[in-house]
Amino acid sequence: MTTALQKRSLAHRLAAAGTVDASILRSRLRRMAYSLWPYAVLALLAVYPAARSWRTGLDPLVDFGRELYVPWQLAEGATLYRDIAYFNGPLSPYLNAVWFQLFGASLATLMAANLAVLGAITALTFHLLSRIASRGAALAASALLPLLFGFGNYGTIANYNFVTPYSHELTHGLLLALLALAAAWQGDKPRRRTALLAGLFIGATFLTKPELTAAAAAGAAASHAAMCFAAGTSWRRVLRQVTIMAAGAVATPLVAIAWLATMMPLPEAVDACLGAWRMAGMAEIRQLDFYRECVGTLDLPMSLRNIVVSLAHGAAVLGAADILDRRIADDRRRWWALALGLCGGALLIVEGYYWPIIERALPMWLAILTFWWAARLVRARKRRLARVQDDDRHEGTAVSDDPRPSPELPQAGRGDVVAALRLGWCVFALVMLGKIALFARVMHYGFALALPAALTVVVAVLDWIPRRGRRRCRGSTLPWLFLPLLAAYLLAYQVQHSMHIHRETAVGLSPQDQFFADADAAPVATALDTIAAYVAADETVAVLPEGVMLNFLSRRASGTKFITWMPPEVLFFGEEAMLADLAAAAPDWIVLAPRDLDEYGYRGFGDDYCRATAAWIDAHYRPVTTWDDDHWRLLRRRDLSERHVSTTD
């Protein structure tokens, strides 16, 4: 009896409580389970990487402190751009300020919010990829998000992951760009409503970073135009829908400007929203060694050589798969490919193969795929036009040689629509690589910028190329050869990640703010304790040239509008304006922190840049204490009394 009762399914019990037939309910539940299980798998894949790297993926001084301090100050009532100088769009700081207002200002709050953003990006990525590839290929590609991109820390400086990103504009902008693509991809035909919705999301990316705006606009517009082309839509209608998309893209920034204009003069509001674009256009900043290295122009010959080597390695894999397809019998082909992939991956790991080299050719592969799908659409359209002309000849109708799109073309097939979406995705992924075009990588900026391209290569190898082989009545061993190599690639990165997970030093004054870093962060922990001991809660302390993380962790305001004095900020805002603000604010305390500036081509703060600022500090502040062999210094304003200075000094 117990067994019989246990066998009563959930569907039967729900059906007994309502009017829905049990078989219909079971069918619905099966469909729901079928549609949701990939998302559950992706969530499970994220558990171990998240647990292993939790509270370890951020740098104690570089970049991420700004991501905490700015929204904290906004939550406390400050106004962005007026009270705090900022060069990116306003969306991310104010969104994070909302989280701080709702759940409290802490590192834990921001990490939890970022984990939700990563989950949304992962789910949306799988949804989009499943539109243009098989579910298996889409799942395999999306698995790279939790396993490679989401929690990675592969270098000496952290912050290049989705949980503690160096810039939330990049992660939020990527989510908005994917939403723009999802809006443009609604249905099998382009519509005005989808064009407007995609435009609104593109406009939202304008409030983050320029590279995200360019990619979102290019991807959504290419998708929409390609779908119109596949459907045989007239150019007039295409232009009308692209205009609607552009109007939506303009509307969102205008709303943001109008809102900012309630807190500052209109010209300042406009200038604030355009700040990231002005910074991207400044030649002085683009010529810094750091940014030239990022794009790959610092050593152009080496960058080009690496791209050629990367292309050769990729071509070798494709060639090996093609040889197996041609020379090995069908019943043994996959086993040969699997064995070759396993042996090759193991050999490369043992020999210490430099895996990032294979990423350098990502822009080239994306360009090839983009051309492939564009040519596929053109060929399909020519075939459909030829069919129309043949029908006209049979009916005795005059045939026009005008190749322009015509609404009389036959309905586009499902394959043409999918090809249009694939073209739009490839354009999006290709434009995303623009900032790292000659130095493509999944590390550093590539954790977000190279993500769509890397996923595109995976779905191309696992689905697009094999599908083409099957249409030619020849099986494809490429996936069986590629998957072991992909596993070896992921293993190599996991080993590298484990080398950069450090828990030697705990930094933070409260459990909600505490994180862990390597032994080199010990002076930062000392600096935090020193600030807590010397600086009263109502006093201000500025950390120069970079280190606003200490302000957030100690909950001491900087008191100045300019919170970072690194070369890009000094070039953008101007040292004269920054020094004038520093003199007017006159913070009670100043912490001078060591910062290696070789990557920017400078020796140090006060040495070959910001000399006037360093001289002003020497004239108006006196040293109170030092640590870490005098590399760190705490300075007190000369005209203030000693009432807050600890007797332990």
Image (spheres, grey):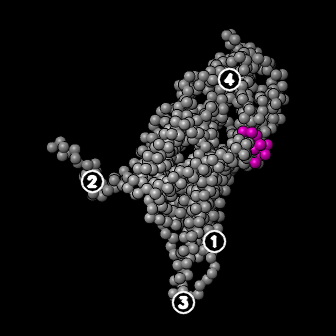
Magenta run includes residue 346: no
**Disc ID at residue 151:** none
Identify the residue position indicated by label 1 in the image. Answer: 235
- The answer to whether one can see residue 270 in this image is yes
Contact, CB < 8 Å: mark 4 with mark 1? no
Q: Residue at the spot x=56%, y=66% of the render?
A: 376
Q: For this rendering, which residue is in front, 408 or 452?
A: 452
What is the span of residues highlighted in magenta in the rendered image? 281-290
Amino acid marked by disc 2: Ala
Amino acid marked by disc 3: Gly
Amino acid marked by disc 1: Trp
Identify the residue position indicated by label 4 in the image. Answer: 538
Q: Quadrant of residue 427?
A: bottom right
Amino acid marked by disc 4: Asp
Q: CA distance from mark 4 to mark 2?
A: 64 Å
Image spot of residue 105 (x, y percent): 58, 32
In the picture, the quarter occupied by the C terminus is top right
Q: CA distance from mark 4 to mark 3?
A: 90 Å
Q: Secondary structure at mark 4?
A: loop
Identify the residue position indicated by label 2 in the image. Answer: 15
Q: CA distance from mark 2 to mark 3?
A: 61 Å
Category of crowding for the residue at label 3, using alpha-carbon neighbours closer than 10 angstroms: few (below 14), some (14–19), many (at least 20): few
